[in-house]
Image (tube, rainbow, N blue to C red):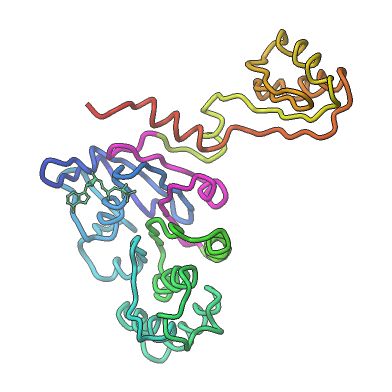
Amino acid sequence: MYAIEVENARKEYGAVTALDGLSLRIERGETVGLLGTNGAGKTTLFELLVGLRSPDAGSVAVLDRDPTEGVGTRRRVGYLPEHAGFPDELTGREVLRFHARMRGVDAERRDRRVARVLETVGLTDAADRRVEGYSNGMARRLGLGTVLVADPAVLLLDEPTAGLDPYGVEAFHDVLGAVASATDVTVVFSSHVLGEVEALCDRAAVVHDGRVVADDDVDALRRQTGENVTVRAAVGDGDADSAAERLRSRDGVERVTGDGAELVVECAPTRALAVLEAIHESGDVERFAVREPGLESAFRTAVADRGERA
Ligand SMILES: Nc1ncnc2c1ncn2[C@@H]1O[C@H](COP(=O)(O)OP(=O)(O)OP(=O)(O)O)[C@@H](O)[C@H]1O
């Protein structure tokens, strides 16, 4: 059963076409990353999913309902916009209580729910501090708390880690990963950071010019690029040159660069082991690394294949 079904959605803002026939289906319990360049249409898609806007054409269903109708469905969808802010004078606990009340969590369960969410997002110790003193990372985790407090079936997060330092990103990922694996919540988050989509998602959809131009599980997307792996090896002085010479003529070897004691070989993924063996024949391999094509290549390929919108 699908948590989200978008069929051929179009949305225009005057002369700007934000969504140009976008289709996307997401099953319940999936964690899906939405990748896209600036202006690709990700925020507009979220706004349709949460019922803030209606499509000009096409259809949108969340939990089998039109999101613009029915408060009940909307309460089951938690949306964290890109720029969520909180009144400075409130404490974290007060912010969560407010959201719990707004989202219809009844009074006798509210405090317990808020305490549990504070624990989940790692803010129990800071719960009674005013949010003006929160770091950026704490504020983002509080934002995640505001959507978790109503126990949503669908979580929509618009660039939730933008602007966070690496520790903040890691802490956010830990919380989100724990939520996604401990519950059957459906998570859709947008990001420009391909690494976080690789780390957290089973599936990634690339949005470009208002359409989904690639949509597959992360490993399959990576493979579709058909790109070479890079083998990097440190060998003894002088050995690199002779190894390079011999490698250039090998099947499946695309390019050999490097100088002195380091070799960098681009080759077909299936040839990586043979390449390493060949380097080893020329001298001792002091250390090596094999780098697989990342989602970044898949993203570039998907976007480049589509070119510009006509
Ligand atoms: N309210 C609006 N009025 C006019 N144009 C808009 C409006 N909202 C979005 N757009 C335009 O629609 C297109 C899609 O924007 P959208 O914000 O959905 O993309 P996005 O993928 O979220 O981008 P970003 O990654 O920069 O946040 C852009 O060209 C944007 O300028």
Q: Tell me if residue 96 can be seen.
A: yes
Residue 69 % position (x, y): 20, 63
The residue lying at 87 percent from left, 18 percent from top is 281
Q: Which of 282 and 268 is in front in this view?
A: 282
**83 relative to 117, above or below:** above
**185 relative to 306, above or below:** below
Quarter of the image for the C terminus: give it.
top left
Describe residue 199's horizontal placement relative to residue 64 as left or right.
right
Residue 145 % position (x, y): 44, 73
**Which residue ends up furthest to the top in the rendered image?**
249
Magenta extent: 184-213
Describe residue 209's horizontal placement relative to residue 12 as left or right.
right
The residue lying at 35 percent from left, 81 percent from top is 88
**Which residue ends up furthest to the bottom in the rendered image?**
108
* Quarter-of-image position of residue 235: top right
The residue lying at 41 percent from left, 44 percent from top is 35
* Quarter-of-image position of residue 241: top right
Residue 287 % position (x, y): 81, 35
Q: Is residue 187 magenta?
A: yes
**141 relative to 281, above or below:** below
Describe residue 177's horizontal placement relative to residue 93 as left or right.
right
Residue 245 % position (x, y): 76, 11
**Which residue ends up furthest to the left in the rendered image?**
14
Q: Is residue 307 magenta?
A: no
Q: Tell me if residue 181 can be seen.
A: no
Q: Which of 215 and 279 is in front in this view?
A: 279
**140 relative to 36, above or below:** below
Q: Which of 157 and 3 is in front in this view?
A: 157
